[in-house]
Amino acid sequence: MATDDTPAARRGRRAPARVLVPLLTALALLLLPFPGGPGSGTADAVSVCQGRPTRTIAFPTGELRLYRTRQYVCALTVARTSGPRRPMSVSIQPRGGRPAVRSGRFDRQTGPLTVHALNRCVRASGSVAGRGTSTGWILC
């Protein structure tokens, strides 16, 4: 018995695979556990900034966290306790550049803010509920 090995027949045999492979891949991604997902611990376990942590400056109502890669510096302000929304802000400025500012009413954190700071110092500030901190020129 001869088999039909024409291009049209081969395409017909591959059609179910074209549908099933993406569908099964999406299903596997939804069902597999991932870091930072439900039941993985606290929200502090995974950082939202890229790079390595360089400074953490504590103040009475929270802390200002700074992260650095080779070219960028990232900052965020984290409240000491989560709770009702309250005024929070974070600011970061590279030397010779304009400050990037994010402020508003948040319950846990504000930021991240990232600025290009290759071979430049930065200064940062953060506040939670009217109390905060600021740095001088750092990470030079």
Image (cartoon, rainbow, N blue to C red):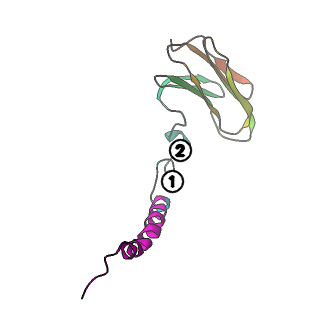
Say if residue 117 shows up in the picture: yes
Q: Which residues are magenta?
A: 1-29
State yes or no: residue 13 in magenta.
Answer: yes
Q: Position of residue 68 (x, y in %)?
A: 49, 24
Q: Residues within 10 Å of mark 1 (few under 14, many from 20)?
A: few
Q: Which residue is mark 1?
A: 39
Q: Using the image as rendered, state which of residue 126 and residue 70 is in the foreground.
A: 70
Farthest residue in the front direction? 6
Query: Could you give the CA–CA distance between mark 2 and mark 1, rounded to whole angstroms?
Result: 8 Å
Q: Position of residue 105 (x, y in %)?
A: 75, 36
Q: Amino acid at mark 2?
A: Thr
Residue 16 vertical position relative to residue 69 in the rendered view, above or below: below
Residue 42 — which label? 2
**Figure quadrant of residue 110:** top right
Q: Amino acid at mark 1?
A: Gly
Residue 82 vertical position relative to residue 2 in the rendered view, above or below: above
Farthest residue in the bottom direction? 1
Q: Residues within 10 Å of mark 2 (few under 14, many from 20)?
A: few
> Could you tell me what secondary structure mostly forms the magenta stretch?
helix
Q: Position of residue 13 (x, y in %)?
A: 38, 75
Residue 29 vertical position relative to residue 80 in the rendered view, above or below: below
State yes or no: residue 31 in magenta.
Answer: no
| The N terminus, quarter of image | bottom left
Say if residue 127 shows up in the picture: no
